[in-house]
Image (cartoon, rainbow, N blue to C red):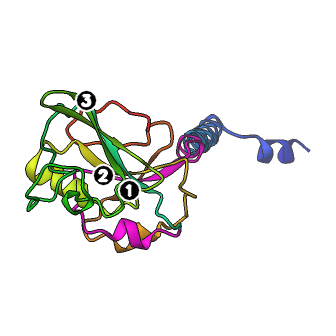
């Protein structure tokens, strides 16, 4: 009987090795759980990085929704009030009137409001905006780039694989945390609500 007891007896080295292995497995498992919680616990949404956008117009045509969930946002922090807006007027417009032939937007989604001579304020009617980015291109070419398109999360169905992201030529779409969902260029990096 003493021989069986001595065979079952664990020496100190084996005990320490087993304790170390067990602690290592528990530690790695705990670290994995924390990382999984941080990764899986944060809801992610699709968003367009306005700094990468090349205004190709695919946001208007390739979204699963009609009209697209991509809408123009006017970043007022960047914009000064002006008389001649490159995102509102066609470059070849002969007159600065609000006539349809002078407007760059094909759906008249940008509304111009007189403030005082010579300043106007521009507002976006999201119901009319189709996300074509023509105004964004004009604003970036002839203005300060304060008109930018973004995915409107009140409309977006958050597809697992965004149909616009698949065809985006500049790889401007990315997944971002839902608590910080907008990526504007030229701002202080603060989130903005639309």
Mark 2 to mark 3: distance in Å? 18 Å
Q: Which mark is residue 88?
A: none
Secondary element type, mark 1: strand
Specify the segment rendered in magenta. Answer: 35-64
| Residue 6 sits in quarter | top right
Q: Circle 2 — which element?
A: loop
Asked if residue 40 is among those painted magenta in the image, a careful observer would answer yes
Q: Quadrant of the C terminus?
A: top left
Give above or below for 186 relative to 96.
Answer: above
Closest to the observer, 80 or 64? 80
The x and y percentages for residue 5 are 84, 42
Q: Are marks 2 and 1 in contact (CB under 8 Å)?
A: yes
Q: Is residue 26 left or right of residue 167?
A: right
Q: Is residue 72 left or right of residue 152?
A: left
User: As rendered, which of 94 and 92 lies closer to the eye?
Assistant: 94
Question: Which badge, 2 or 3, comes first in the chain's sequence?
Answer: 2
Please provide percent x and percent y for residue 152: 47, 49
Badge 1 local density, few (<14 within 10 Å), some, or many (20+)? some
Which mark sits nearer the N-terminus, 2 or 1? 2
Residue 163: x, y in percent?
46, 71
Kindly state the secondary structure of the residue where label 3 is placed: loop
For residue 174, which numbered disc appears in the image? Answer: 1
- Where residue 49 is drawn, which disc sits there? 2
Kindly identify the residue that appears in the image at 17 percent across and 50 percent down.
139
Frontmost residue, 145 versus 84: 84
Per the image, the residue denoted by label 3 is 77
Name the residue at the top extreme. Answer: 116
Q: Please say whether residue 52 is visible from this viewpoint.
A: no
Q: CA distance from mark 1 to mark 3?
A: 24 Å
* Quadrant (top left/top right/bottom left/bottom right) for the N terminus: top right
Spot occupied by residue 190 in the image (x, y as percentages of width and height): 33, 30
Q: Residue at x 48, y 64 (%)?
A: 67
């Amino acid at each position: 009987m003493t021989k069986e007891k001595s065979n079952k007896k664990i020496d100190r080295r084996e005990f320490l090795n087993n304790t170390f292995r067990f602690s290592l497995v528990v530690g790695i498992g705990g670290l994995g759980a924390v990382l999984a919680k941080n990764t899986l616990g944060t809801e992610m949404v699709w968003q367009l990085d306005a700094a990468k956008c090349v205004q190709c117009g695919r946001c208007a045509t390739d979204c699963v929704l009609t009209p697209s969930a991509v809408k123009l946002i006017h970043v007022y922090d960047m914009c000064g009030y002006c008389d001649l807006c490159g995102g509102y007027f066609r470059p070849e417009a002969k007159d600065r009137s609000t006539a349809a032939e002078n407007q760059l937007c094909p759906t008249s989604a940008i509304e111009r409001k007189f403030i005082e001579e010579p300043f106007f304020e521009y507002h976006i009617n999201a119901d009319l905006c189709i996300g074509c980015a023509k105004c964004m291109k004009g604003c970036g070419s002839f203005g300060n780039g304060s008109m930018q398109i973004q995915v409107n999360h009140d409309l977006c169905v958050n597809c697992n694989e965004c149909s616009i992201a698949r065809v985006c030529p500049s790889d401007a779409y990315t997944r971002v945390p839902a608590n910080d969902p907008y990526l504007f260029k030229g701002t202080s990096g603060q989130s903005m609500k639309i």
